[in-house]
Amino acid sequence: MRYREGGDLDTSHVQDRRGRGGSLGGGRGIAVGGGGLGLVGLIVVVLVQVLGGGGGGAGGGLGALAGLGEGETADTSTLAQSCDDSGDANDSVECAVVADIDSIQDYWSQTLDGYVPTQTVFFSGQVQTECGGATSGSGPFYCPADQLVYIDLTFFDTLRSQFGAEGGAFPNAYVLAHEYGHHVQNLLGTNRQVTPGDAGADSGSVRLELQADCYAGTWANHAETVPDESGAPLIADITQDDVDRALDTAGRIGDDFIQEELGGGTVDQDAFTHGSSEQRQRWFLTGYETGDPAQCDTFATDDLG
C-alpha cells in the first residue's frame, strides 16, 4: 500500500500515552475486539471484558481524555512533528496508522449519517480505559464506554513473530479498520444486541466480529477514492498483494487457527468469540468486493460461512 505525498495528516485523532504509566483498575462497559489474542493465553487483565462481545453504554464525549489512569497523560506534539506530511506514512508505522485512521474516518463520515469521529489511543504495556485496565496482550480493542480505540503498536510485530503473518501496511490498516467497525456498531447500537460473555460458533460475539471485518472491507474498497479535506484520497495505491496479506492476517486471527496453532492444539467451537479463519476472510472479502455496508448484516443470516 502506498500513501499520497503532499497531504496533511490529522494527529488530533490520536492520544499518545506510550511510556506514560497508568495503573490498572476497574471500569464499566465491555471492550470489543481484542484481536483474539487472549485466546492464546497472553496476559489480559480484563479477559472477559475484552473478549466477551459487545455491550456497554456510549460514554465520554469525543476528544475527551477519557479513561486516563492515575499518572497517565496523552501528548501528540512529537507525533505531529514527525507525521506532518501524508508521505511520511510510507516510511513510518506511526504515521501510517495516523493516515489509516484519517482515511477510515473520512470514509465513515461520508458514508454513515450521524457518524461521530473518535480517537485511537497509542499505549505501551498497559492502559486504563472506561472498560477497565488492559495490557498489550489484549491486542487492539474498542471500548464502547469511552468510545476509544486502543492499540499497542507492537501488536503488528506480534502478528509476524508469533502468528506468522506476512504483515505489511495494508494488513495493519485492516486491523484498525476492524476496530473502527466496532465504533460504527456502537453508534448504531448493534453491539447492544450481544450478551456479554456470549461465545460459540453461532454466537452474537462472533457475528459482531465478522461484521467488523466486513466493515473493514468496505472501507478498503473505497480507500483509494475516499477524499480527505483537500479533496484527494490519502491512500494512493492498494495492490492485490496487499489484499492477500490482509487475508493472511485475517486467517491467523481466526479462533480455530489460534486454538490449534497457538493454543492447546484442539479446536473448540463452543469457545469461539471472533469466528474461524475462513469466516473472517470471507466477511472481509464480502465488504471489500461489494463496498456496501448493507451487505455486512451478519445478524440476519443463517450462513456465516
Image (cartoon, rainbow, N blue to C red):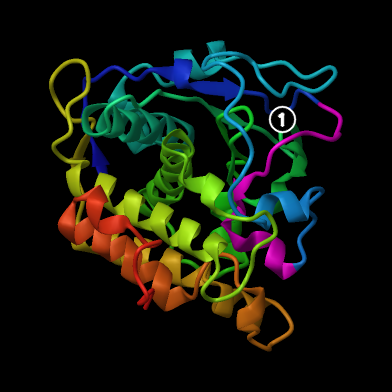
Please name the residue shown 40% across and 61% down the image. 299
Range drawn in magenta: 22-40
Is 203 above or below relative to 117? below
Is 83 above or below relative to 245? above
Q: Residue 109's quadrant in the figure?
A: top left
| Residue topped by disc 1 | 130
Q: Quadrant of the C terminus?
A: bottom left
**Disc 1: CA contacts within 10 A as few (<14), some (14-19) or many (>=20):** many
Please name the residue shown 48% across and 33% down the image. 94
Is 291 above or below relative to 134? below
Residue 281 position in % (x across, y down): 36, 69
How many numbered discs sit on the rendered protein? 1
Is residue 1 among the parts visible in the rendering?
Answer: no
Residue 120 position in % (x across, y down): 53, 30
The one of 51 and 198 positioned closer to us in this rendering: 198
The one of 7 and 293 positioned closer to us in this rendering: 293
Q: Amino acid at mark 1?
A: Glu
Please name the residue shown 59% across and 35% down the image. 144
Left or right of 202, for residue 161: right
**Is residue 250 found inside the magenta-colored segment of the image?**
no
Element type where label 1 sits in the image: loop
Left or right of 269, for residue 191: left
Is 200 above or below relative to 184? below
Residue 300 position in % (x across, y down): 35, 63
Left or right of 54, for residue 12: left
The one of 214 and 125 positioned closer to us in this rendering: 214
Is residue 56 among the parts visible in the rendering?
Answer: yes
Please name the residue shown 27% across and 64% down the image. 285
